[in-house]
Image (cartoon, grey):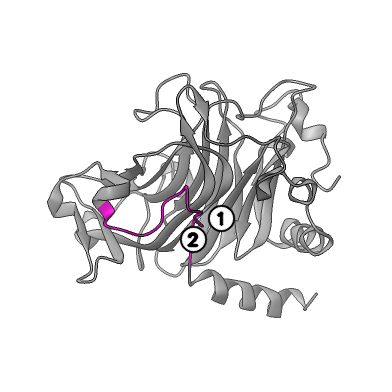
Amino acid sequence: MESNASSMARVLLILSVIFTLFSSSNGVVGGAFEENFSKSCPGTHFKTSKDGQIWYLTLDQVSDCGFITKQSYRFGWYSTKLKLVGGDSAGVVTAFYMCSEVEAGPLRDEIDFEFLGNRTGQPYLIQTNVYNNGSGGREMRHQLCRYSKFNQRWVDPLRRFFVDKVPIRVYKNANHTNNFFPAQRPMYVFSSIWNADNWATRGGLDKINWENAPFVASYKDFTIDACPWKNPYPACASSTTQHWWDQNNTWHLSSKEKIDYAWVQRNFVVYNYCQDTVRNKYKPQECWLNPLD
């Protein structure tokens, strides 16, 4: 690997570019926004470029904004190109996540990427989290730069969070211990920008400066390579060996991914719930699993 300084510069430059979600013929494959997504904000807060390929979500004191896939999925690779709010974005959270319930009910399963806003000149933090049956508290935070390419890969043994194809977090299936792994229910894919100044920046000390509003995040190339859910059963399964998520080599990190993952843990992790002895008197059982095994 490069030196820490040059490696960080390279990664942060790459991260300032994109955030993408790949698609198979069964997933989201282009077309008009209305064909694949529903928006959850006033029309004034959701706009598109002239060619319809870039979507702009706005947060101001009137409303936040978000959108959701009309289709739910199990297994797959999810990503989108996302440009975060620039300048003073303290208190603003831009999110890309999956949830088993459209209204995010109290017993939901959820997998989160959340981008925590900052005061001018300070780096964004990426917070990832996992909810199972309504319980969360599995946060990790990584220090990264303004724009990023993020992906999620879901197969039964583990969930992986990627930045520019580099795994920054591996969350393994702990069914044999505490069963804290959201694997059974299909999930919708969401993106949103919203006011979280009660907790997002320095634990809520830095509030949104509304004089800087409106805050705008932009998305493009939102695609999915995943198994679409069709009641009462999915259109595909993780045990047929007919899809990439059925293959043994997708259930583990490659040799290069292991090296990259270890490098990220050394240089970019700023919080890991597994190491928080104040919050957790006893380390959660999944924390004993080695993500590199």
Confirm or deny contact between disc 2 and disc 1 (CB under 8 A).
yes
Query: Quick one: label 1, few (<14), some, or many (20+) residues within 10 Å?
Result: many
What amino acid is labelled 1 in the image? Answer: Asn
For the point 70% across and 22% down, which residue is it? 179
Q: Of the two numbered discs 2 and 1 on the same chain, state the one appearing first in sequence.
A: 2
Q: Which mark is residue 263?
A: none
**Alpha carbon distance from label 2 to label 1:** 6 Å
Q: Please provide percent x and percent y for residue 63.
A: 19, 44
For the point 52% across and 67% down, which residue is it? 145
Query: Quick one: label 2, few (<14), some, or many (20+) residues within 10 Å?
Result: many
Q: Does the magenta run of residues contain 25?
A: yes
Q: Please provide percent x and percent y for residue 149.
A: 52, 64
| The residue stretch that appears in magenta | 18-33
Which quarter shows the C terminus?
top right
For the point 77% across and 78% down, which residue is it? 2
The answer, for residue 195, to whether it is visible in the render is no
For the point 73% across and 37% down, which residue is it? 157
The residue pinned by badge 2 equals: 20
* Image side of residue 169 versus residue 25, left or right: right
The answer, for residue 29, to whether it is visible in the render is yes
> Quarter of the image holding residue 264?
bottom right
Q: Please provide percent x and percent y for residue 260.
A: 76, 63
Q: Does the magenta run of residues contain 19?
A: yes
Report the predominant secondary structure element of the magenta stretch: loop
> Quarter of the image holding residue 9?
bottom right
* SS under mark 2: loop
The residue pinned by badge 1 equals: 151
What amino acid is labelled 2 in the image? Answer: Thr
